Amino acid sequence: MIISARKDIIESILINAQPFLERKDPTNITSHIYIDAKDNETTIRATDNEIGLEVKSDQFAVEVPGTFTVNGRKLLDIVRTLKLDNITFELEDEHLLIKQGKSKFKLPTFNHQEYPTFPSLDDKESITLDSISLIKSFKKINPAIDTNNPKFELNGALLDIKTDKTFIVGTDTRRLAVVELENNANSEISLIIPKKTITEIQKLFLDEIELYYNENHLIVKNEQFYLYSRLISGKFPDYQRIIPKTTKLNFNIDKKSFIDATKIITTISNDILITFDNNLITLKSLDNSNQEAQTEIEAPITIEEPFTFAVNSKFMLDFLSQIDTDNFNIGLNETTLPFLVSSQNFKTVIMPIIL
């Protein structure tokens, strides 16, 4: 087997493949990428058995067709050191030779026939949703998805498709983020998609996609990429019960002013004390040390008596960084009860810090 391609093309594919590789055990075949070169198309795969990526490219010159596997991390390290020119790959016995000019590298390969197979579309049902809206929704709720939670279902996002609406939900138990999309579906579907998968979908897919699923897998594809992921089994929290149905106090706040004020306070503390009063919002650091930060925002607020609560600033900034409007709404009940921030079809329920 002898193939070649420009460094920038190879490097881009290898960078996209890295999150899909087994990192801990280089002796495992899933630490390798799989490359199958034919006359008109080269297929590159990477998988850790939980999530996998297939890339098809016509940018490789195939002198002699063939198939091999090679350590994906090590190959990327080598490619990065080479010049912006063609790189040649040649299979010799059980090793891959990487050549460019006077530089030459040799890496061991594994038996490509033992490489894990990817799930096909044969037993999968399609999901009909607006692709762009779905990808944007994943981005909005991603910061709220937990990581390494012993309740595995919280380490993923819920894709809850109803006949007239779709809800995309993420929670880390201290906040719950929800995007609501309009749709017209023939059946109701509820899937829990791992956070890692959500993150990679955002990186790889920027426009129209096709989605397929069964009980165990989700497949996302377009002309260039084919991504599969195992789904998380379990019961996701009843998010509709967590969202406050009514709020006693409701204010419309300028986003930029609130972000700027919050960043001032975070120079001292990530936990902030917020007080709403007539025509004024006061933000103050919540810190037991001798340090203190305080600032104020003028706002068109009418309230019978001041309302004060404490919150982790990251939760507020995560929400505000994902909205497109100049203003956002905040709904409050009691200082110890979860409050609601919202903009258009995106809302986040946040648990305050109990003082």
Image (cartoon, rainbow, N blue to C red):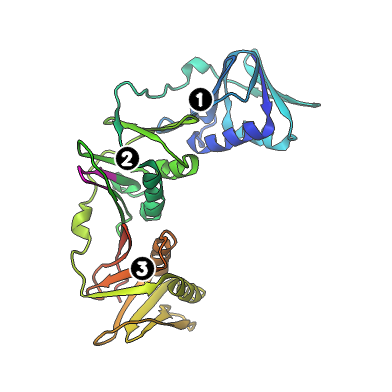
* Mark 1 Cα shell of 10 Å, populated few (<14), some (14-19), many (≥20): many
Q: Look at discs 1 and 3 and give the one toward the viewer.
A: 3
- Residue at (30%, 42%) from the top-left corner? 192
- Residue at (44%, 41%) from the top-left corner? 201
Q: Which residue is the site of mark 1? A: 29
In the figure, 16 relative to 64: above or below?
Answer: below
What's under tag 2, amino acid-wise?
Leu
Q: Which residue is the site of mark 2? A: 129
Range covered by the magenta-colored residues: 159-166
x and y, in percent, of residue 87 in the image? 71, 26
State whether residue 203 appears in this view.
Answer: yes
Q: Viewer-proximal residue, 70 or 139? A: 139
**Quadrant position of the C terminus in the picture:** bottom left
Kindly state the secondary structure of the residue where label 3 is placed: strand
Kindly state the secondary structure of the residue where label 1 is placed: helix
Checking the image for residue 328, the label placed there is: 3
Query: Is tag 1's residue or tag 2's residue first in the polypeptide sequence?
Result: 1
Location of residue 298 by image quarter: bottom left
Query: Is tag 3's residue or tag 2's residue first in the polypeptide sequence?
Result: 2
| Inter-mark Cα distance, 1 to 2 | 35 Å
Query: Is tag 1's residue or tag 3's residue first in the polypeptide sequence?
Result: 1
What's under tag 1, amino acid-wise?
Ile
* Mark 2 Cα shell of 10 Å, populated few (<14), some (14-19), many (≥20): some
- Per the picture, the main secondary structure of the magenta-coloured stretch is strand
| Inter-mark Cα distance, 3 to 2 | 26 Å
x and y, in percent, of residue 127 in the image? 30, 35
